[in-house]
Image (cartoon, rainbow, N blue to C red):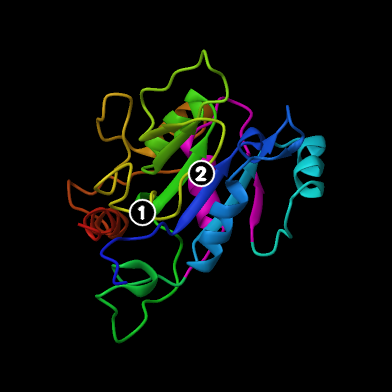
Amino acid sequence: MVRNIDLPEALILYGSPVVWNEARSSWRSGLDELVEQCREDDTAVIMLVEDDTTIQDNVQQNLMFPIGDLQVLLTETQVPPNPRDLLRALEALSIQPKAFGGSSGFARRQHLEPERHPLPQRSVVLTHTLDQTRAARAAGMRVVRLLLDSNDNDTLADAVVGEVVDFSIDDIATPGSFWLNPPHPRDDWGNRVDPYEIAARRLNVVDHEVPSNGGELNDAELQRILADIDPL
């Protein structure tokens, strides 16, 4: 069947509770099916887990299927989650971009695009805390929040589901069951933000400089704008 959607380029599983159900000592229900769909459609899957050896060993030893090409990365910051962890996770990968329409799209191009990192606006993050939701929004990514506590609440995520991953890769496509258009880096109120500035403030360091050039756009800024409007 011809698709008229963009499938995700990357799925980020943010934090070990997203991956591992501690109460049941098992892989989170439904997640293995979603990961398998990602593999079939060449969507990269990243497990971004805490910098804790015990947690890493538990995740690695209890997977219900071989890790294969899943990327297991560590969060690098000790402060509440921020967009730098997510953006660096994408920078660790290279993908072969697809034409609009996913794996069987109607706009298949004659020549393949060069390999590149997954785009934030074409990435989906599964989170389990409000701070992680904020980090994903600030990074310009779509967010699906797993509510692991019945007393919890998250009004910022693009979609909120229960403890079971009961949606498919088509549901988190653009457009899909949860959203219509690609996102942009945004704060709690939907205002556009610079994720690198947020990361610098939280870490009290500056690792991303915005050059002063008299108001003219440099190459990096032009590429960012083009990346924002490309899916539209």
Could you say where residue 70 lies in the image, as x and y percent from the top left? 64, 58
Could you say where residue 55 lies in the image, as x and y percent from the top left? 77, 36
Q: Which amino acid does label 1 sit on?
A: Ala
Q: Residues within 10 Å of mark 2 (few under 14, many from 20)?
A: many
* The magenta stretch spans residue 172: no
Which residues are drawn in magenta?
70-95
Quarter where residue 108 is shown: bottom left
Q: Do we see residue 204 in this rendering?
A: no
Q: What residue type is labelled 2?
A: Leu
Q: Do we see residue 40 in this rendering?
A: yes
Residue 228 is left or right of residue 97, and the answer is left
Could you say where residue 199 lies in the image, as x and y percent from the top left? 47, 34
Q: Residue at x 72, y 57 (%)?
A: 65
Q: Residue at x 32, y 47 (%)?
A: 211
Q: In the rendered image of this protein, does residue 69 appear above or below residue 82?
A: below
Q: Residues within 10 Å of mark 1 (few under 14, many from 20)?
A: many
Of 150 and 101, which appears nearest the observer?
150
- Residue to which mark 1 is pinned: 173
Quarter of the picture holding the N terminus: bottom left
The mark closer to the camera, 2 or 1, is 1
Quarter where residue 110 is shown: bottom left
Residue 79 image label: none
Quarter of the picture holding the C terminus: bottom left
Q: Which residue is drawn at 59% across and 47% down?
A: 31
Could you say where residue 151 lies in the image, as x and y percent from the top left? 52, 13
Identify the element where label 1 is drawn. loop
Q: In the rendered image of this protein, does residue 72 appear above or below residue 178?
A: below
Q: Residue lying furthest left in this view?
A: 215
- Residue to which mark 2 is pinned: 86
Q: Which residue is drawn at 49% across and 62% down?
A: 43
